[in-house]
Image: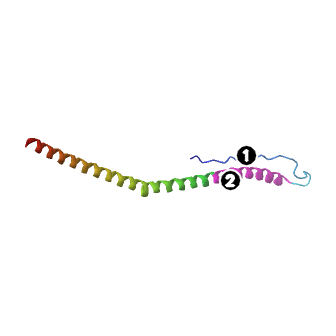
Amino acid sequence: MGVSVPVINLQMKDHPPYFSSLKVNMAAEDATDRFKKILVLLARLAELKITTLRLAQEAQKTIRKVNALEKVYIPYYQEAEKNINDRLEEESRDAFSMLKLIKQKIKK
């Protein structure tokens, strides 16, 4: 039961210059660089979010299975074990009483 974990490889093609260097100040270039960094962080965030959601779904499935075991299967088999033990004890008592009867008949 593995959980597939996505891997997002963000590849950006760089086509400088994005603007004319004559009339643009340094803030525009800084904003472009920050935007690229934000895109990388968003890709990583998306990867982590999808991974977290998939792990949560798998945990829910596991919880449902454990609940089914605890509430249905284990009590069923415990009851079956009790019935088998009771039957074996009854057979043992019957065999013991039969053995007593045989011994009494042999003594007579």
Residue at position x 91%, y 55% from top? Answer: 23
x 82%, y 51%: residue = 29
Residue 104 screen position, x and y as percent: 11, 45
Specify the quadrant that holds the C terminus: top left
Q: Name the residue located 54 percent from the left edge and 53 percent from the top edge.
A: 59
Q: Is residue 30 left or right of residue 74?
A: right
Q: Nearer the viewer, residue 41 or 30?
A: 41
Observer-nearest of 86 and 23: 86
Which residue extends farthest bottom? 71
Residue 45 is one of the magenta-drawn residues: yes
Left or right side of 14 for 94 = left
Q: Is residue 39 magenta?
A: yes
Q: Is residue 65 left or right of residue 2?
A: left
Amino acid type, callout 1: Asn
Res 46 label = 2
Q: Position of residue 26 (x, y in %)?
A: 83, 52
Range of the magenta residues? 25-50
Where residue 68 is drawn, which disc sits there? none
Query: Which residue does the image show at 68% across and 53% down from the upper left?
Result: 46
Circle 1/circle 2 CB separation < 8 Å = no
The overriding secondary structure of the stretch rendered in magenta is helix
Task: Name the residue at the top extreme.
Answer: 106
Helix, strand or loop at label 1? It is: loop
Q: Which residue is mark 1?
A: 9
